[in-house]
């Protein structure tokens, strides 16, 4: 059941149907963003944040895991032109089949440092 709720969460984000998040989150849901040291207290603030976020973003949900009471997702977030993208690893806690808490760790996608490629320590993959 929990994985279904998390999939719905990402579908709402992908479709820019931020009001739909109301269907999958508790009223007092907490969303933590450690990268920027922010917390959104209550789903209404998180929904409003998404509505106001600049540009239009899409989601490829790449991985979904259940571990006890926690659902973990890895998603690639990208703009329409695919000129910018990020990975977000999210930890969801549910209560009564609704999202009660999310902790999201964001990472920017980019090029590896040139020295690692030059020294053949790593290789690029598609």
Image (cartoon, rainbow, N blue to C red):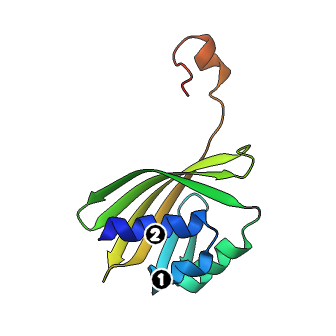
Q: Is residue 64 left or right of residue 85?
A: left
Q: Is residue 112 left or right of residue 7?
A: right
Indicate the position of residue 93 as horizontal and vertical percent values. 35, 71
Q: Quadrant of residue 36 in the image?
A: bottom right
User: Disc 1 designates what residue?
Assistant: 23
Q: Quadrant of residue 83 in the image?
A: top right
Indicate the position of residue 39 as horizontal and vertical percent values. 55, 73
Q: Label 2: state its secondary structure.
A: helix
**Closest to the observer, 46 or 38:** 46
Indicate the position of residue 112 as horizontal and vertical percent values. 62, 28
Residue 108 seen in this snapshot: yes
- Picture residue at 55% right of the left edge, 28% below the top: 126
Q: Is residue 109 left or right of residue 75?
A: right
Q: How many numbered marks does the figure carry? A: 2
- Picture residue at 61% right of the left edge, 76% below the top: 18
Q: Quadrant of residue 20 in the image?
A: bottom right
- Position of residue 80 relative to residue 45, above or below, is above
Q: Is residue 88 left or right of residue 45?
A: left
Q: Earlier in the sequence, mark 1 or mark 2?
A: 2
User: Disc 2 designates what residue?
Assistant: 8
Q: Are marks 1 and 2 in contact (CB under 8 Å)?
A: yes
- Position of residue 39 relative to residue 119, above or below, is below
Residue found at the very far top of the displayed protein:
119
Indicate the position of residue 91 as horizontal and vertical percent values. 40, 62
Residue 41 seen in this snapshot: no
- Picture residue at 64% right of the left edge, 17% below the top: 115
């Amino acid at each position: 059941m929990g994985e279904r709720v998390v999939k719905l969460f990402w579908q709402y984000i992908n479709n820019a149907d931020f009001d739909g998040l109301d269907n999958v989150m508790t009223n007092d849901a907490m969303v933590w963003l450690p990268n920027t040291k922010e917390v959104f207290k209550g789903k209404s603030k998180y929904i409003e944040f998404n509505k106001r976020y600049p540009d239009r973003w899409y989601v490829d949900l790449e991985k979904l895991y259940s571990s006890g009471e926690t659902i973990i997702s890895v998603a690639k977030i990208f703009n329409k032109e695919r000129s910018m993208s990020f990975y977000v690893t999210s930890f969801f806690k549910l209560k009564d089949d609704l999202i009660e808490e999310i902790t999201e760790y964001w990472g920017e996608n980019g090029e590896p440092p040139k020295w690692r490629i030059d020294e053949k320590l790593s290789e690029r993959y598609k």
